[in-house]
């Protein structure tokens, strides 16, 4: 995968012309980058889950979550999922 050096441009038109002239090389490069990224994800069993959610917790809450997860013998993510599930069911009943 050879990275194509991009020169400094003096105008937007010059830049547009350069990208147009190198379209095939750039497409090939980006295809290679995409394949490399997919391969890397596969090697590390990283799956982009459409149901995944990032939750920002305060340090105290995170510490408590980790402590309770360890006590239950589960990982923090599983416990958090369980707690959210329970809280949603309780709020539905109210």
Image (cartoon, rainbow, N blue to C red):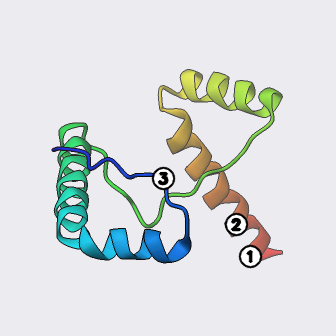
Farthest residue, direction front: 10
Looking at the image, residue 59 lies above or below residue 4: above
Alpha-carbon neighbours of circle 3 within 10 Å: few (<14), some, or many (≥20)?
few
Q: Identify the residue shown where x is 41% and y is 52%.
A: 7
Secondary structure, mark 3, is: loop
Secondary structure, mark 2, is: helix
Residue 8's disc number: 3
Relative side of 26 to 53, left or right? left
Q: Identify the residue shown where x is 24% and y is 67%.
A: 22
**Badge 1 vs badge 2, beta-carbon distance below 8 Å:** yes
Where residue 10 sits, quadrant-wise, is: bottom right
Which quarter shows the N terminus?
top left
Relative depth, front residue between 48 and 59: 48
Relative depth, front residue between 27 and 93: 27
Alpha-carbon neighbours of circle 2 within 10 Å: few (<14), some, or many (≥20)?
few
Residue at the spot of label 1: 92
Which of marks 3 and 2 precedes in the sequence?
3
**Badge 2 vs badge 3, beta-carbon distance below 8 Å:** no
Q: Identify the residue shown where x is 47% and y is 65%.
A: 51
Residue at the spot of label 2: 88
Looking at the image, residue 24 lies above or below residue 57: below
Secondary structure, mark 1, is: helix
Q: CA distance from mark 1 to mark 2?
A: 6 Å
């Amino acid at each position: 995968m050879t990275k194509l050096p991009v020169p400094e441009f003096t105008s937007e038109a010059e830049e547009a012309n350069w990208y147009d002239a190198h379209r095939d090389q750039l497409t090939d490069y980006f295809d290679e980058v995409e394949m490399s990224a997919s391969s890397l994800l596969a090697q590390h069993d990283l799956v982009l889950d459409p149901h995944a959610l990032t939750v920002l917790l305060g340090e105290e809450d995170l510490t408590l979550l980790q402590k309770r997860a360890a006590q239950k013998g589960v990982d923090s993510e599983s416990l958090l999922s369980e707690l959210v599930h329970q809280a949603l069911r309780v709020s539905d009943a109210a």
